[in-house]
Structure formats: C-alpha cells, structure tokens
Amino acid sequence: EREREREREREMNVVSQHTCTRAAAVVPSPVRDTFAFSSSARAGSSRALSVNVNFNTRKAAVSRLSALSLRTGARSSRPSVSVAATGDDVTVSDTKQKFLEKFAFPLPALYSNVVNELIVVHHLIKYSPKHQYDKIYALGFVSIYDGIMDSYTGDKEIVFNSYMEALEEDPVAYRADAEKLTAWASTLSNVDDLTANEAGSEFQKEFSTYATGFEGRTRLYNKFFAIGMFRLLELASSTDPASLEKLAASLSVPLSKVTSDLATYKGMLSKMTAAKELMEEIIAEQRKKTAQREAERLQASASNGELPNGGGTPSAA
C-alpha cells in the first residue's frame, strides 16, 4: 500500500512539472513564479502541491485565453465578433464630416472657423458620460449661435439645422426651449425669481432638479450652461456680480468656472465684432478702390477722345 502511494506521488510530481513547463511559456510572469514555487515543493507535500497546481492551472488557462482573445485572430479560423458602435465611438471628425455633408455650401472664413470651433466644443459636451440636455443649456447655445451668426447674410436656420443634425440633436427642441425661457425671463426683474427653488415657478422647480444633479455629480456642468445663466440674468435685468453669484449658488455650479467661461464667451464675441468691423472696412476699401479705378479709366478714355460708352459720334440733326 505504501509503495502504491509513493508511485502515485511520483506520477503527480511528473504531471505537475510537465504542466508547469507548458504553462510557463504562455502565462504572465506572476503566475509563472507561482508555478515555479509549487513545482519545487517536497514530495511529502503532494496534497498541497496538487491544490496549488490545479488552482494555478485554471489561472493559466484564463490568462492564456485572455491573451489569445486579444490577438488579431490570425491563427483562428472562427469569424470575429463585431460590436455595434455607440455614442462613445463617434469622433469629432465624424461630426464635422456630417456637418459638411448636410450643409454642402461654402461658409465665409469668418464664420467657418468659429462654427468649426463650436462643433468641437459641442461634440465634447454632447458625448461626455454625464451630459444631460436641459433648457438653460439650450438657451446658452442658441444665444451664442445667434450672436456669432448675427451678420451672416445667408440662411442662418439652414446652417443651424445642419449643425444640430450633425450632432444628432433636435434643432426644433433647442429653439423652442430657448424661446420659452426667453419669454419667461423677460417678465422678471429680480434674480430671486430666477433661482432654483422647489417651491417656486415651474421653471424654478425644474432648475432645482438641475441643482440636485450637479450637487450629486450625476449631471455635468458645461460652457453653454454658463452662457444660458448669463442670458437669463440679462433678460431679467440682473447682470450684477451679486446676482450671478446667487444664481450659481442656487444651481450648485462653481462660480469660478462660470465667470471664467463667461469671460471666454465675451472675449469671443468681442473678437467676432472686431473681425466683422475689419471685414466691413476691407469691403469698403475694396469698393473705394474699384470706384477710383473706374473713374481713372473714364478720365483716360475722355482724354483720348473716346466716348465713355464706346459708342460712335452723334449724327447731325
């Protein structure tokens, strides 16, 4: 009986060492070190060795399967499994390309550059994990869009709709929500009527849900929200710093970020205004030069005895 037990122990050791040798070639070093330690156990600890080898063999198998699943599949004849794309797979380039496909007309460089920058910012906000659409956010974007495209001579709504559809957003909802807030805030004259308040008006109650989300970190603050806040204060004639601070506190948004984003927004509008003024000056200068060249041409024609319209000499009556 003792001889049989010794024979079984010898067979177990041979099997264990063989398993360890094969596993060492494919498993990560931490598991490989465990196998090396287990294989050097004494023959008297054969039961413990068996447990260790069986446990680590499973780990090696899992590690090997994981490693194989990450490979390109060149050695496997099975078809690969494809995963459907989600919102996280949409890139900024994809959104820009969608906009170009939907708005297949050239935009003047002054507007094209700004619209492209807006697309980048809006894309990053839209596809952030905690982003949630709300009316203040909609008002903020509509305000900045209308401010930027104010002097655009083309159809602003076609650009707006193409922009929104590229981001898979609803342009009608943005406009409608922005108009609702604009109409409501225009009737107010005090910041207290704007603040988030569970016992206030319907909009104030809705704002309180935004505040709960920001406070619980289930909703993400963004630049368009800050601009929407400022627009509400403008409509209610309450743009003083104390009113801004009170509104930010009620909505549970960081005042430092709000003031920073508003400064950026105002700076961008100032640059747009300066660029428009410069463009108008350039156009006026070009028109002036064109008129001057035409006057010089007419003067040269008159001095050479030519009629201005290139016609013949008048016939005698």
Image: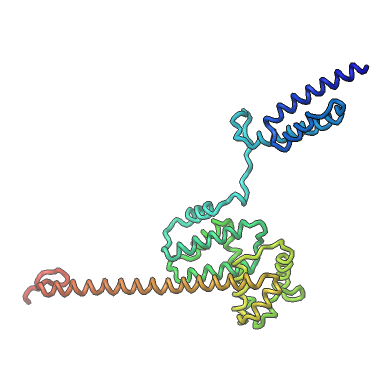
Residue 129 position within the rendered picture, expressed as x and y whole percent measured from the top left: 66, 56
Residue 184 position within the rendered picture, expressed as x and y whole percent measured from the top left: 64, 76
Residue 311 position within the rendered picture, expressed as x and y whole percent measured from the top left: 13, 69
Residue 295 position within the rendered picture, expressed as x and y whole percent measured from the top left: 21, 74
Q: Residue 121 appears in which quarter of the rendering?
A: bottom right
Residue 151 is at least partly visible in this image: yes
In the depicted view, which residue is nearer to us: 88 or 183? 88
Quadrant position of the N terminus in the picture:
top right
Residue at the left extreme of this rendering: 316
Quadrant position of the C terminus in the picture:
bottom left
Residue at the right extreme of this rendering: 1
Q: Is residue 109 left or right of residue 300?
A: right
Name the residue rendered at 39%, 73% in the picture.
Answer: 278
Q: How is the image coloured?
A: rainbow
Q: Residue 310 appears in which quarter of the rendering?
A: bottom left
Q: Residue 237 appears in which quarter of the rendering?
A: bottom right
Name the residue rendered at 86%, 18% in the picture.
Answer: 7
Name the residue rendered at 83%, 29% in the picture.
Answer: 49
Name the residue rendered at 57%, 67% in the picture.
Answer: 141
Residue 180 is at least partly visible in this image: no
Q: Is residue 77 above or below residue 2?
A: below
Q: Is residue 270 above or below residue 29?
A: below
